[in-house]
Image (cartoon, rainbow, N blue to C red):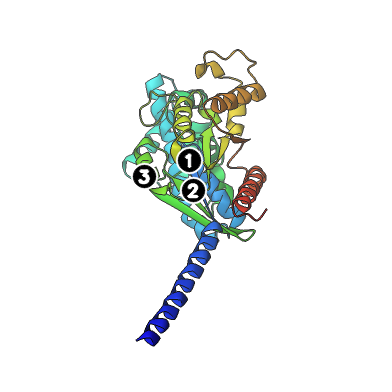
Amino acid sequence: MGHCTSKDQKEGKRLNRRIDEQIKKDQSMSLRIIKLLLLGAGESGKSTILKQMRILHKDGFSQQDLEMIRPVVYSNCIHSMLSILRAMFHLQIEYGEPDRVRDSQLVFATVHANKEELTEELAQAMQRLWHDPGVRECYRRSNEYQIDDSAKYFLDNLPRLSSPNYVPSEQDLLRTRIKTTGITEVLFELKGLTFRVIDVGGQRSERKKWIHCFDNVNAIIFISSLSEYDQTLREDNCTNRMQESLKLFDSICNSPWFADIHFILFLNKKDLFAEKIVRSPLTVCFPEYKGQQNQTECINYIQWKFEQSSQREIYCHHTCATDTNNVQFVLDACLDMIIAKNLKSMGLC
């Protein structure tokens, strides 16, 4: 009887030792997984940053991936023109040439028929429209209605996009917009660690899903669009987009959920901001602003507004999500910082 008890005790100790070893192994594995959340309001550039991570740290996009995005390019291009044409009616802007009315009817008919193929006839009509003075004036006032940031890029490239052998480029893919619904994830290895990067839709209706991603987060990259300081939300056509972003940033940054999490702020779309700030004053969003109407001072003020709403240390970067070199430079700095802090938490440095 005593012999059996002794044997059982040895077996129990052996089992406990195995369990302890497995727990240590699991803990070591979990410490080597970095969970990174991309958060921000809708259309801030989160999905573009995620695409860049795939380009920079995974295998990028295959020829098949690029060919599959062609219908999205066509749709984005056609709907960009459609947004302008609808706005011309509401803003009561006349076409520079009367013949453009016929061209606009072709665009409306194409969308109404649910046929978004960029035929030669449609492409030529859209090119004529894009060069029309009235259409250009309407586009200049694009902050007064809803239109994708990539509109000018795609409309400027209409001759290339409508060529018979057109295959989207990597830059075309970065510029495409598909509303993010649900959760998108990219995994990659870097310096012995596994990065799990998660993008969740930023529209108000999507934010309730964020709570499902909050466990075991190491760092958050909050993305805000600099160029949207004079635009309203697509959801309500009323709320200023930057004010919405500031409010969202404040609620996340100061949440007890993220008290021990590294917080990184990307002030994105600095290229579009540089173009816009020369014609649209920052006081549209911040009436109290008294500084110079130039890119550097205005961005510094916006950064200050974000930092003022935070009670913690923020690592801030100014980005252009469609510029791979810029994103690589910024991401290298951010990921190195996250790795260093993770190693410190593991007691390895």
Q: Is residue 267 shown above or below 293?
A: below
> Disc 3 residue type?
Lys
Question: Residue at label 2?
Answer: 217
| Quadrant assignment for the N terminus | bottom left
Q: Is residue 207 shown above or below 4?
A: above
> Disc 1 residue type?
Phe
Q: Quadrant of residue 320?
A: top right
- Classify residue 298 as left or right of residue 233: right
Pick the front one: 344 or 236 = 344
> Tags 2 and 1 in contact by the CB under 8 Å rule?
yes
Q: Secondary structure at mark 2?
A: loop
Q: How far is mark 3 from mark 2, CA to CA?
A: 15 Å
Q: Quadrant of residue 153?
A: top right
Q: Considering only order in the chain, which callout, 2 or 3, is on the residue closer to the N terminus? A: 3
Whether residue 122 is visible: no
Q: Secondary structure at mark 3?
A: helix
Question: Residue at label 1?
Answer: 258
Q: Is residue 16 shown above or below 264?
A: below
> Disc 2 residue type?
Val
Whether residue 253 is visible: yes
Closer to viewer: mark 1 or mark 3: 1
- Classify residue 133 as left or right of residue 275: left
Pick the front one: 7 or 197 = 7
Question: Residue at label 3?
Answer: 209
User: Badge 2: how crowded within 10 Å, few (<14), some, or many (20+)?
Assistant: some
Q: Considering only order in the chain, which callout, 1 or 2, is on the residue closer to the N terminus? A: 2
- Residue 226 in picture, x, y percent from top left: 55, 30
- Residue 49 in picture, x, y percent from top left: 55, 45
Q: Secondary structure at mark 1?
A: helix
Q: Considering only order in the chain, which callout, 3 or 1, is on the residue closer to the N terminus? A: 3
Going 59% across and 54% down the picture, which residue do you hit? 55
Going 58% across and 35% down the picture, which residue do you hit? 314
